[in-house]
Amino acid sequence: MTSKTQTAIPMLDLRAQYAAIGDEIRAAIDEVLAAQQFVLGPQLAALEEEVARSCGRRFGIGVGSGTDALLLALRACGIGPGDEVIVPTFSFVATASTVSWLGARPVFADMDPATFNLDPAEVEARLTPKTRAVIPVHLYGLPAEMDPILELAARRELAVIEDNAQAIGATYKGRKTGAMGTLGCLSFYPSKNLGAYGDAGMIVTDSEGMAARLKRLRDHGQTRKYLSEELGLNSRLDEIQAAVLRVKLRHLEEWTKARQAHAARYTERLSGVSGVDTPVVPARREHVFYQYTVRITGEPDAASRSALAAPRGVPSARDRVQKALTERGIATSVHYPVPLHLQPLYASLGHKRGELPHAERAADEVLSLPLYPELTPEQIERVAEAVVSAIEQAPRD
């Protein structure tokens, strides 16, 4: 039970964020309400320019969600029935379901067990004559290993669509995430480092022609009012959300620094704790810590143990630690408990447990701890102490 003298620690505290910037937010929304222009107006145009610049791109195209960003990006790259798109199996379902919506087939690849990101060797191993694109995901805020993927894509003339939903502002060898592939896709879901007050997303690109087409696709395929030249969607980032995001964008750099400082404190506190693996950040990659995700292995030599050997339905060490933290009033989350190749949605593809072992093991071990700019040192210490205590008290697997 939570102590009477301690309040619960949430995964994310948007109320604390609003308390700090509420005046700016209300003024920005009031400006939209006074103008009475709610769709495809000046706030969106300004946001598109500002986000594109922050991502190191020429153009931004605001859309209704991060999922729509992926769907429209794939459509703009010509993906359709009969095509294959290589995606990481360790990701949110939208990374693959958008491929399926276009009649193409997602081909699932395993991850680098050190970083949780797509393994470039796995991409090469899954190439076929039908492969048309690759979607690397910058998971948890850490850039994927892009150079080998980009080199492979250039040789095979593949589109590279960066799923940058979790990593705005991160860098890979001096380049911003979202600025390296054919297109970069962003999500502004409220929990994200740059979050709207509802669903919203954006695609960024350096191609003027691609930007023009994406603007048509998000607006029913129209080239002018009531004249549609191709099948499109109604997926337009509205003016109120654009105004909110413009306010938040001004604070993003300081929020990112706070996240990184909090993550460093967690790592300092948890490094060396037997049964806990802290995040790995390879050289020349900047992590923006959308999530601070550890592995709960439950035993010192778990790196050599396959989680697949554990009977299904038996609580893992991760599950026991998560339960212990919940009892102390500390929220946690699992991103993600079921790899995409084992989702019921893709049962028809015939994948079996054991095919992509690194992702399957990670699904049994990952645990995301509370992380947001307003988190206090005392809260970080309380979370870390609870993790250590739960590990020490848990029976060994």
Image: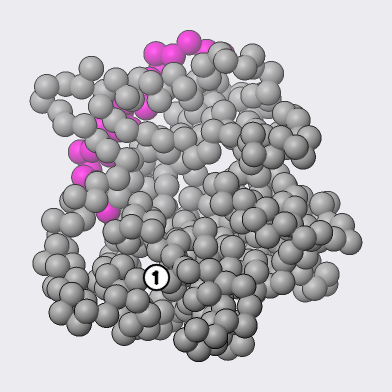
Residue 342 x, y percent position in the rendering: 67, 34
Q: Residue at x 41, y 76 (%)?
A: 51
Q: Which residue is at a point 48% across and 10% down the rendered structure image?
A: 395
Asked whether residue 301 is drawn in magenta, I would say no
Asked which quadrant contains residue 75, the reply is: bottom right
Q: Residues within 10 Å of mark 1 (few under 14, many from 20)?
A: many
Residue 378 within the magenta-colored segment of the rendering? yes
- The chief SS type of the magenta part is helix
Left or right of 355 in this view: 310: left
Q: Is residue 102 visible?
A: yes
x, y percent for residue 198: 33, 57
Q: Secondary structure at mark 1?
A: loop
Q: Nearer the viewer, residue 51 or 111?
A: 51
In the shown orientation, is residue 54 left or right of residue 172? Answer: left
Q: Of all residues shown, which one is farthest toward the top? A: 395
Color theme of the render: one colour
Quadrant for the C terminus in the image:
top right
For image coordinates 54% across by 26% down, the residue present is: 297
The residue shown at (56%, 51%) is 94
The residues colored magenta run 373-397
Q: Nearer the viewer, residue 397 or 319?
A: 319
Provide the residue designation for mark 1: 237
State whether residue 256 is above or below residue 155. Answer: above
Amino acid under disc 1: Leu
Which quadrant holds the N terminus? top left
